Image (cartoon, rainbow, N blue to C red):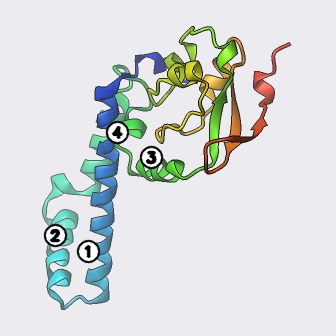
């Protein structure tokens, strides 16, 4: 796992930054839509405007080209530079459009991380190892399934829990647990 993940910011303010990825997802979908429209009808108004925008990005403005914008700035400067300050999942958590799409899917998923409220010792290990900055212990103390759409089900919290309180499970539409899945990695001897 990421040894720097404890540096990832937690709390309400940082949870608001997660919408940046959804904003970028909408922007990507708008760009895709205009690009498809320009291919479908190149002589229409939207086709002409889109051709000028994409022509400028691809040919006329070198600093806005893919090579500079994505390869150098996003991957190089943000991805590597922010690692030492926040941890390795800064881009994934706050700005990645794919992660934003996964968050939408997670809202409708029936699979959750289930907790046993009686066995939780409030050690906060689960929250401190969460890559996404979710207050996992808050869910565990209340004994409710973890329903945060930011959760990518990486199982870091399950594996690090010293009392094996957390496990994967499936819930029905009303939030009742249907079945539990026990990971081999969490089996304590």
Mark found first going from the N terminus, 3 or 4: 4
Left/right placement of residue 11 relative to residue 111 reads left
Q: Name the front one of labels 3 and 2.
A: 3
Mark found first going from the N terminus, 1 or 3: 1
Residue at mark 3: 99
The one nearer the camera, 102 or 66, is: 102
Calculate the distance from the C-alpha at mark 1 to the C-alpha at mark 3. Answer: 22 Å
Local packing at callout 4 (Cα closer than 10 Å; few below 14, some 14-19, many 20+) is many
Residue at mark 2: 53
Mark found first going from the N terminus, 1 or 4: 4
Calculate the distance from the C-alpha at mark 3 to the C-alpha at mark 2. Answer: 26 Å
**Circle 2 SS class:** helix
Local packing at callout 1 (Cα closer than 10 Å; few below 14, some 14-19, many 20+) is some
Please identify the quadrant where the C terminus is shown: top right
Where residue 41 appears, as percent x and y from the top left, is 26, 90
Q: Residue furthest front?
A: 174
**Circle 1 SS class:** helix
Local packing at callout 2 (Cα closer than 10 Å; few below 14, some 14-19, many 20+) is some
Where residue 142 appears, as percent x and y from the top left, is 56, 22
Residue at mark 4: 18
Calculate the distance from the C-alpha at mark 2 to the C-alpha at mark 4. Answer: 28 Å
Residue at mark 1: 34
């Amino acid at each position: 796992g990421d040894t720097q993940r404890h540096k990832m910011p937690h709390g309400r303010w940082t949870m608001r930054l997660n919408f940046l990825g959804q904003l970028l997802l909408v922007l990507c979908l708008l760009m895709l839509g205009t690009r498809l429209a320009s291919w479908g009808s190149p002589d229409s108004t939207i086709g002409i405007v889109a051709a000028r925008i994409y022509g400028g990005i691809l040919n006329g403005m070198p600093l806005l080209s893919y090579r500079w914008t994505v390869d150098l700035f996003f991957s190089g400067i943000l991805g590597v530079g922010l690692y030492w300050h926040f941890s390795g999942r800064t881009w994934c958590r706050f700005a990645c459009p794919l992660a934003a799409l996964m968050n939408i899917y997670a809202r409708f998923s029936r699979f959750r991380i289930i907790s046993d409220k009686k066995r939780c010792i409030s050690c906060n290990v689960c929250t401190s190892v969460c890559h996404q900055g979710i207050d996992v212990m808050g869910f565990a103390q209340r004994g409710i399934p973890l329903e945060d759409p930011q959760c990518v089900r990486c199982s870091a919290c399950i594996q690090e829990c010293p009392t094996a309180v957390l496990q994967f499970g499936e819930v029905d539409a009303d939030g009742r647990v249907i079945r539990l899945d026990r990971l081999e990695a969490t089996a304590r001897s």
